[in-house]
Amino acid sequence: MGSYQYEAINKSGEVVTGRLDAEGQDNVLERLRGMGLMAMEIKEVKDSSLFGQLKIASKVKLGDLSLFSRQLAAMINSGIPLTRSLNTLSKQVTNKTLGTALGEIARNVEGGVSFSEALKGYPNIFSELYVNMVNAGEAGGSLEATLNRLSTQMQKDKELRDNIKSASFYPLAVMGFAVIILFAMLFFLVPIFVGFFPPDVQLPLPTQIIISASDGLQNYWYIIFPILGLIIFAIRSYAKTDAGKRKLDRVKLRLPIFGELIQKTVVASFARTFSTMMSTGVPVVAALEASGNATGNTVVIEATQIAGEKIQEGSSVAAPLEESGVFPPMVTHMISVGEETGDIPDMMDKVAEFFEEEVATMTKGLTSLIEPLMLIIIGILVGGMLIALYLPIFTVITQI
């Protein structure tokens, strides 16, 4: 990724200048068009220093964006102009990538570009959902309220993701540790035990299997490990395709124990986003589809797209979502009540809060359940292997 200095004309015919970090000039042109600017000149800025050549842009996390949104809302509420607020925050935020982007956004806004259009130039930082929300807030004169809603939503999304990570980290770490122990025993421990076995002793079937696995691993590791790597690479590549992601998302929702947790997380994210967008005046079909996209689950995305088409044909919001079978009855019932009372955002807020609490409670329960379960699994793996290795020795002793 390089840094590019540009000179462009905004919609008012004024010349504006700025700087963007992009993959190439084509990417710069695309981002400038997204900001409503017509490029006149683009130059790559070279950094000859060693630090500049090795510099890696830090990723902007949800927590960074949540804090920025809340701070910007507070400054706007205090009567500080938008450009001054952005310039101040560009020097104040701890994330350097976000700080650089905010400085460039401030210059573009000073040049006559709207805030939402300026945000479009940084799709790696500000999602389409974020930009659309800001655009709706600008149009409705409620930018401060919109930023506060966005901050709250991103904070809730972060908590949901943290809960999922905390629930999955322990079993993944323990399973990884178990695999390392298994390979270490096959590589180093099994050959030592084989030397103790008399040549004419009849080995039990479990012992034969372990010895064969150890011999195969030691003699053909240069074939086995590349094959395992290719299998993992193939699975990851397939998971990135549309068909693979759709299949994987369906499997995730049907997993024992974790499937229910993932479903509740997805529903909480959908409800929170839907509430936020509806409260800022975004049309229901656009809000519905954007909320589906925000979950990242293709099953939900397809369900919301189909629902959007049926709503445009005259259907209610709740009916097509209920027909999809993706959402729990509580969600569709609350949407139906919201349609009757004219207060869908409030209903969706309550749904989001309910499922967020469910995710937090379930995460704690899973952690306490998984810890002893994983210890039992490791005990079975290690203990089973040791018993299989000691069986021939016990057999010889018994015969003597």
Image (cartoon, grey):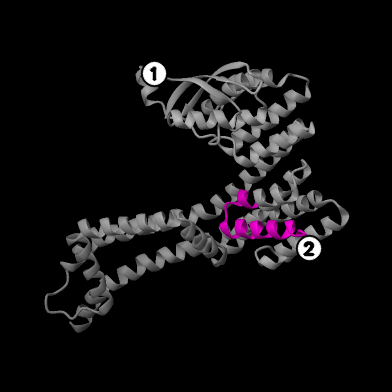
Name the secondary structure under disc 2.
helix
Quarter of the picture holding the C terminus: bottom left
Q: Which mark is residue 267?
A: none
Q: Which residue is under mark 1?
A: 47
Q: Label 1 sits on what residue type?
A: Asp
Residue at position x 59%, y 39% from top?
127
Disc assigned to residue 333: 2
Q: Main secondary structure of the magenta part?
A: helix
The residue furthest front is 13
| Tag 2 and tag 1, C-beta contact below 8 Å | no
Q: Real-space Cα distance between discs 2 and 1?
A: 58 Å
Quarter placement of the N terminus? top left
Q: Quadrant of residue 326?
A: bottom right
Q: Position of residue 13 (x, y in %)?
A: 63, 18
Choose top left, top right, bottom left or bottom right for residue 377. bottom left
Question: Which comes sooner in the sequence, label 2 or label 1?
Answer: 1
**Circle 1 residues within 10 Å: few <14, some 14–19, many ≥20:** few
**Which of the 4 quarters of the picture holds residue 105?**
top right
